[in-house]
Structure formats: structure tokens, C-alpha cells
Image: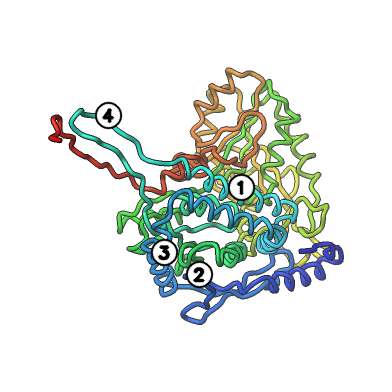
């Protein structure tokens, strides 16, 4: 796909981009190896957050569509897909990834249109998502059972077997990346998948399903777009779904866990975060400020692992805030299709309203808004869901802006004076997804990493991004289970132990 024509006005760029998107595929539900409308015939619009215009309409799936998808998935498990070897699955997934890489530009365009993220960032994320699928396609060849040397008169070994049908529900902030985290290991392990993508951003999931035609057997990968209380609840509570993987906010995670419990269905939950970045007095303050600014502004702050709480030693607080404000203000807010844009809109009107309510709340609670927080107008951006990245200072850790997940570009700075206070502040939230530590003292870094309750700790550089093979998941209300790791593949299988007696004096 050629993207050079995206260089005009914002409105013209997005009119042309929507036309390009509509020409790419059917964007209907993908069930049993083909496109189909929802059983009800109903549709809903996915909207462009830059100009708030509809991109296209997709099927509004419900329980009937999920039932059809689950049935197709079981047919695949009981048929061709269920008979494949790890080597055969590896080759099939590699072939699919190769095709998807050939369509990288169009997948990035769909991701950018759906979410409002800068096109260059979308390209990088699509590439990373495909890397994860490829990773699991590679390592599944080496997985297997083990022999247990427990007795001389018995041969005891284990088998790893797929669950069968896996139900996956993904959020809107990183649609393709988080889809790949789930379907990569699920498919590589030999399961079939029923995926419900977020209603705000279903396009890349639908497109990669279309691009699986002729590669994945029918029914192996099914996509049912729709709303959480309809299609999503039908997936997570379905009696014939044998494993559920969900990423989203913690309150929804409670509902998913409850629905799965009725069928004793195992779940993986990757939920919210309110991640701290602790800046000790010996830290490289310039680097720490740059790191925090990058984390809270990337993807417009709509990241579960964004370090939204800077916990800064009182001796370096003023210097840190000065540099943080400079870094935050340096971003170029604009059309995500423009090359120089580094900061796009929030994903929807609902998210825009939520972030603005917290900006108002922070002032009411007594924090000082050091920069940002205003709406963005002019340059053709008036119709989109843009808000300036904001930094609150003079904050207390018990304020709601420091306790609750805002999921937007809002940083809160809290100060501390002792190590013990820093750790107490870092852990004094309901979440434990990620954290960062800035210090030049290696022993202090290791000590803080051990004392902070979070699933991932970054030292000095807060990447906030996972790499293939590194476990990702949270403590406390941030969820259960780990994604992205080698062991994630095992979590999509069940272990079976086989006992075979061995005669001590066999008769020949």
C-alpha cells in the first residue's frame, strides 16, 4: 500500500484513509474460515478518533454468533487441526506470519485509524505483534512432556495437550499486539481460538483473520466483533470454551473471572495498573524525566503499564519536575497520519470525557497542574478527542488521581524523603503491574526491585514494552498469569500423566 498521499489537510487525509481501509476487505465476522454477517443482521460503526467520523460498519455479534464460532472451533480441534504435530503447526503459523508481514502497511493504517496512534508507532507495534506469533511458532517445536523416574517397575511420563477451544477478549489500546500475545501461544499449542476484539478497534483482528484464508484450517481462528456485555460475555461464560484469556480493566476482570468460575474454566487476566517510577536522589534526573515523559505520553497514556506515578526524592524534586515538564511539552500533537506527529488523540469520546474528569478532579483535590490538560484546537483537530499531556505536582498518594487508573496522559508527582517511605508509596495502590527505579547504585536498584510489589520492574530506562520471552503480568488487582514468556505456551495446555507398569521378569 502506498501512503504518500497522506500529506494534505487532516480532513482530507482521513477521508482518503477511510476509503483505503474500506477497500481492503469485508471486515465481517470470521467464523469457520469465512466472512459472515451477524446472525441478527445488526452492525455498529468503528469511528476515527481524529475526526470522529465512522470508518466502516462491522457485525454486532452476540450469543448466536459465539455459539457458531465455538462449534466451528471444536470441529477444527476434532478434525484436521487436532491431528497436527508441533512441527506442522509451526510451519503453518510461519506461513501466516509471512503473509501478514506482506500486508504490514495496511495493518498499520487500520491500527492507526482505529486507535488514533501515530502511523509510525502503529507500524512498529504491528511488527512487534507479528514477532510474538512467530516466536511461539518457533518454540512450540521444542515443547513436550517429561519422564519421571519414580519407580523401577513403572514407566511414568507426561503429555502436554491443548485445552481445545480458547476464548480471548482483547482491549482497544494495543489491538494487534495484545491479540498476538494470546493467539500466538494458543494456536501454537494446538488450540482453536474464538476472539472478541474491543468494539473500538476491531479492524486489524478482522483483517488478519481474512488473511488466514487458505493457510489456517477452517474454524481454527474465529473473530466475533461486538460489545462486551453481548459477544464478550458469551465468550467468557461459554460452557464449551475450555480456557479464557482476558486483557482489560480490573472491574471487568472480576466479571470475567466470575463467569469462567461457573464452568471451572481456567483464566489468564492482564488487568489495570497504576505503576510507580521511583527516582532516588543519586539518579540521572534528566534521563529519569525523559523516561517518565516517554512512558506517560506514548499511546496518549493509554497503556496499562504506563508509569503514571513519579515518586521522587525531595532533594531532586524541583529539577525533575522542570525537566519532566520540558519533555512533556516537547511532543508534537497532531494528525497521526502526519510524519512528524508524536502524540495523537484519545481513542473515543468516552475516554476523552474520563480523562478530563480526572483533570478536573486533580485540581479539586488540591494538586497543582504544572502543565497541559487543555483541549487541542485548530489545525483541523477540533473534531477529535485530543487533550494535552498533563503533569500534576504537589500531590498526595491518597488522592484519587494517584490511586485510580486514568488511562490517559496524566502524570502525578509525589515526593518522599526515605527509602522506606518510597517503597510504602510505591506499594500503596491496589495494582501491581509494573514499576520503575532510577538510581546509580546497583545494590539499591536490586533491593527496591525486590521490595516493590509488581510483576515487571525496569531499572533506569522504563521501556514499558515487553520482548519475546520475557514474562508479563501483574500482582494484586493487576491480574493473574503471565503472557509473552516461554511458559505462556504451557499455560495453554493441560498436563496428563501416564503410568505404564514394567514387568520385572518378562517372559520371552
Q: Quadrant of residue 176?
A: bottom right
**Neighbour tally class for label 3: few under 14, some 14-19, many 20 plus, Cα within 10 Å:** many
Question: Whole-Å distance between the Cαs marked 3 and 2?
Answer: 10 Å
Q: Quarter of the image containing the N terminus?
A: bottom right
Residue ID at (48%, 41%): 474
Between disc 2 and disc 4, the foreground one is 4
Disc on the earlier residue, 3 or 2 = 2
Query: Are the residues flagged by discs 2 and 1 in contact, CB closer than 8 Å?
Result: no
Residue 79: percent from left, percent from top: 38, 64
Query: Are the residues flagged by discs 1 and 4 in contact, CB closer than 8 Å?
Result: no
Q: Is residue 67 left or right of residue 452?
A: left
Q: Quarter of the image containing the C terminus?
A: top left
Q: Which residue is mark 2?
A: 33
Q: Which residue is mark 1?
A: 131
Q: Quadrant of residue 243?
A: bottom left
Question: Whole-Å distance between the Cαs marked 2 and 4?
Answer: 44 Å
Q: Which residue is mark 3?
A: 76
Residue ID at (38%, 48%): 493
Amino acid at each position: 500500500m502506498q501512503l504518500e498521499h497522506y500529506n494534505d489537510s487532516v480532513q482530507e487525509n482521513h477521508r482518503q484513509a477511510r476509503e483505503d481501509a474500506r477497500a481492503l476487505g469485508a471486515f465481517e465476522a470470521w467464523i469457520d474460515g469465512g466472512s459472515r454477517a451477524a446472525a441478527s443482521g445488526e452492525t455498529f460503526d468503528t469511528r476515527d478518533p481524529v475526526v470522529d467520523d465512522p470508518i466502516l460498519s462491522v457485525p454486532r455479534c452476540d450469543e448466536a454468533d459465539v455459539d457458531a464460532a465455538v462449534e466451528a472451533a471444536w470441529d477444527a480441534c476434532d478434525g484436521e487441526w487436532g491431528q497436527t504435530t508441533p512441527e506442522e503447526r509451526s510451519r503453518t503459523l510461519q506461513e501466516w506470519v509471512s503473509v501478514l508481514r506482506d500486508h504490514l502497511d495496511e495493518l498499520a493504517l487500520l491500527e492507526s485509524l482505529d486507535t488514533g496512534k501515530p502511523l509510525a508507532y502503529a507500524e512498529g507495534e504491528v511488527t512487534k505483534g507479528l514477532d510474538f506469533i512467530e516466536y511461539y511458532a518457533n518454540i512450540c517445536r521444542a515443547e513436550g512432556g517429561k519422564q519421571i523416574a519414580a519407580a523401577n517397575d513403572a514407566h511414568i511420563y507426561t503429555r502436554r495437550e491443548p485445552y481445545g477451544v480458547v476464548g480471548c477478549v482483547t482491549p482497544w489500546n494495543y489491538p494487534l499486539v495484545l491479540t498476538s500475545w494470546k493467539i500466538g501461544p494458543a494456536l501454537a499449542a494446538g488450540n482453536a481460538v474464538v476472539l472478541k476484539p474491543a468494539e473500538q478497534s476491531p479492524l486489524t483482528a478482522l483483517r488478519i483473520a481474512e488473511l488466514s484464508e487458505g493457510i489456517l484450517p477452517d474454524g481454527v481462528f474465529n473473530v466475533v466483533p461486538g460489545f462486551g456485555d453481548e459477544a464478550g460475555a458469551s465468550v467468557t461464560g461459554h460452557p464449551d470454551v475450555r480456557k479464557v484469556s482476558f486483557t482489560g480493566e480490573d472491574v471487568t476482570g472480576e466479571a470475567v473471572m466470575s463467569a469462567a468460575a461457573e464452568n471451572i474454566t481456567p483464566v489468564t487476566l492482564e488487568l489495570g495498573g497504576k505503576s510507580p517510577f521511583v527516582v532516588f536522589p543519586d539518579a540521572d534526573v534528566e534521563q529519569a524525566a525523559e523516561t517518565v515523559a516517554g512512558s506517560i505520553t506514548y499511546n496518549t497514556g493509554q497503556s496499562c503499564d504506563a508509569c503514571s506515578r513519579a515518586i521522587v526524592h525531595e532533594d531532586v524534586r524541583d529539577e525533575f519536575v522542570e525537566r519532566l515538564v520540558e519533555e512533556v511539552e516537547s511532543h508534537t500533537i497532531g494528525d497521526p497520519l502526519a510524519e512528524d506527529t508524536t502524540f495523537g488523540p484519545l481513542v473515543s469520546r468516552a475516554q476523552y470525557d474520563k480523562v478530563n474528569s480526572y483533570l478536573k478532579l486533580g485540581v479539586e483535590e488540591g494538586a497543582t497542574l504544572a502543565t497541559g490538560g487543555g483541549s487541542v484546537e485548530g489545525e483541523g483537530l477540533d473534531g477529535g478527542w485530543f487533550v494535552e499531556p498533563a503533569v500534576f505536582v504537589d500531590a498526595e498518594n491518597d488522592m484519587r488521581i494517584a490511586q485510580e487508573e486514568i488511562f490517559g496522559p496524566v502524570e502525578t508527582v509525589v515526593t518522599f524523603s526515605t527509602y522506606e517511605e518510597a517503597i510504602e508509596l510505591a506499594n500503596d495502590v491496589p495494582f501491581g503491574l509494573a514499576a520503575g527505579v532510577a538510581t546509580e547504585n546497583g545494590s539499591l536498584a536490586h533491593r527496591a526491585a525486590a521490595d516493590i510489589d509488581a510483576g515487571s520492574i525496569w531499572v533506569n530506562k522504563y521501556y514499558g514494552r515487553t520482548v519475546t520471552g520475557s514474562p508479563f503480568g501483574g500482582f494484586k488487582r493487576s491480574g493473574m498469569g503471565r503472557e509473552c514468556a516461554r511458559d505462556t505456551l504451557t499455560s495453554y495446555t493441560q498436563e496428563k500423566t501416564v503410568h505404564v507398569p514394567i514387568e520385572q521378569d518378562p517372559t520371552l
